[in-house]
Image (cartoon, grey):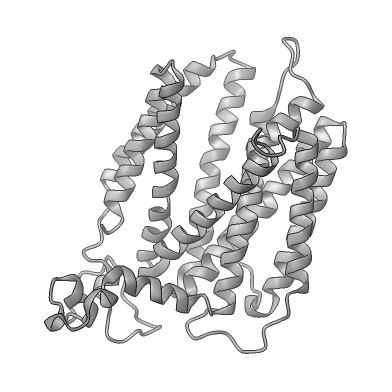
């Protein structure tokens, strides 16, 4: 589909979410809203892949940093506007939803003006993969002769001798299995799956924790929007800084991931044991900032280990497994069909989860070999 149709679908789905939030009054409407939310989150993978289709691999680290910072600055802006509107302007939540509907509608207009790549690299691979002058998907002059994969995808089955094993989907899955043997790609993909699952569980339940520590009443002001703004601003700064880090990631990745994850585990313990809401807010800001610091590095490390045509596939597979893991943990820990724990015991479980991850990363042996072909040192 070459990305753009998927991005348009995402924008339409985003608009559907807010139409249902504004106009829906039933449980069925909210369930339908959650369906469109799922479509929106799934289609978000196309954004990262589209970004990487625009540039050469030597610029992947900067591009990952810039795009992630842009996303976080958007969240920061919305958090600030929301907090100021509620605190100073006494704006209703319904009005805020109308404002959000306006923003996502404008986002659809912007999406329509994106330039669509002329061709998909997966079906039109160049014969030589040069590092210096590798073309981007938006290049106009790459009329290379069709490759073997082009012929298959274009209907030429080569006399029918290859069969279903040479179908595009099977070919992609085989390449994915081969990629899993690359140490750096495997490490950062596992980080994406396990740490993302834990990160989003914290995001989903932290406001419940805040309400336990600082119960909301009519005469109390809450500053959750301000905290979100501060945490996303720190995350944006951290993401931007990650684009300029000069570290041999092939050598130090496990140590950096382990130390950041251990720091996150300590922050979770502090959040769960303190009775001071401001201390809990501060720990949450640092928790989100530390995660967002590693996200562009993970994107960059994964992207530089891949050919461009496989970025969307690997990002999608990682996100899928992270979502499955997050769902399993939710059912076991929080759902009534499982343990049904209250928020404080839940956060002790999440503390143990991040502690186990940190120990695992720190005990991971250092790689013995030089970087895999195609890997880029920061």
Q: Does 304 appear above or below 337?
A: below
Q: Is residue 336 left or right of residue 3?
A: right
- Quarter of the figure with residue 337: top right
The residue depicted at 58 percent of the width and 58 percent of the height is 193
Residue projecting furthest to the bottom: 369
Task: Estimate the x, y position of residue 70 in percent, counting from the top left.
Answer: 50, 49
In the picture, the quarter occupied by the N terminus is: bottom left
Residue 365 at least partly seen = yes
The residue depicted at 74 percent of the width and 47 percent of the height is 350
The residue depicted at 62 percent of the width and 41 percent of the height is 331
Nearest the eye: 159 or 1 = 159
Residue projecting furthest to the top: 218
Task: Estimate the x, y position of residue 63 in percent, counting from the top left.
Answer: 47, 62
Q: Is residue 64 left or right of residue 358?
A: left
Q: Does 170 appear above or below 343?
A: below
Count of numbered tags:
0
Nearest the eye: 186 or 240 = 186
Q: Is residue 309 left or right of residue 138?
A: right
Q: Does 90 appear above or below 189?
A: above
- Quarter of the figure with residue 175: bottom left
Task: Estimate the x, y position of residue 135 in percent, counting from the top left.
Answer: 31, 75
In the picture, the quarter occupied by the C terminus is: bottom right
Residue 121 at least partly seen = no
Nearest the eye: 167 or 268 = 167
Task: Estimate the x, y position of residue 334 in percent, counting from the top left.
Answer: 68, 37
Residue projecting furthest to the front: 337
């Amino acid at each position: 589909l070459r990305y753009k149709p998927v991005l348009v679908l995402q924008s339409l789905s985003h608009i559907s979410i807010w139409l249902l939030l504004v106009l829906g009054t039933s449980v069925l409407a909210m369930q339908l809203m959650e369906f469109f939310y799922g479509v929106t989150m799934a289609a978000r993978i196309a954004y990262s892949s589209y970004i990487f289709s625009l540039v050469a691999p030597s610029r992947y680290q900067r591009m990952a940093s810039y795009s992630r910072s842009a996303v976080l600055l958007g969240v920061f802006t919305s958090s600030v506007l929301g907090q100021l509107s509620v605190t100073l302007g006494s704006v209703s939540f319904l009005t805020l939803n109308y404002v959000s509907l306006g923003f996502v509608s404008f986002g659809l207009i912007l999406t329509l003006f994106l330039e669509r790549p002329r061709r998909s690299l997966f079906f039109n691979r160049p014969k030589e993969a040069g590092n210096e002058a590798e073309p981007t998907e938006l290049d106009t002059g790459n009329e290379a002769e069709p490759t073997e994969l082009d012929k298959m995808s274009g209907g030429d089955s080569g006399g029918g001798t290859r069969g279903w094993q040479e179908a595009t989907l099977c070919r992609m899955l085989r390449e994915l299995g081969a990629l899993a043997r690359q140490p750096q790609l495997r490490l950062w993909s596992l980080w994406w799956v396990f740490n993302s699952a834990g990160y989003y569980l914290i995001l989903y339940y932290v406001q419940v924790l805040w309400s336990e520590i600082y119960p909301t009443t009519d005469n109390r002001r809450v500053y959750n929007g301000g905290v979100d703004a501060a945490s996303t601003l720190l995350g944006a700064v951290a993401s931007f800084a990650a684009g300029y880090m000069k570290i041999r990631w092939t050598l130090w990745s496990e140590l950096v991931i382990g130390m950041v994850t251990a720091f996150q585990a300590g922050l979770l313990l502090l959040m769960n044991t303190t009775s001071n809401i401001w201390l809990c807010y501060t720990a949450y800001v640092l928790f989100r900032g530390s995660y967002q610091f590693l996200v562009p590095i993970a994107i960059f490390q994964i992207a530089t280990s891949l050919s461009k045509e496989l970025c969307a596939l690997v990002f999608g597979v990682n996100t899928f497994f992270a979502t499955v893991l997050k769902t399993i943990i939710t059912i076991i820990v929080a759902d009534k069909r499982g343990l049904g724990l209250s928020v404080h015991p839940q956060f002790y479980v999440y503390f143990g989860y991040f502690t186990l991850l940190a120990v695992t990363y720190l005990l991971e042996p250092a790689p013995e070999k030089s970087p895999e072909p195609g890997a880029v040192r920061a």
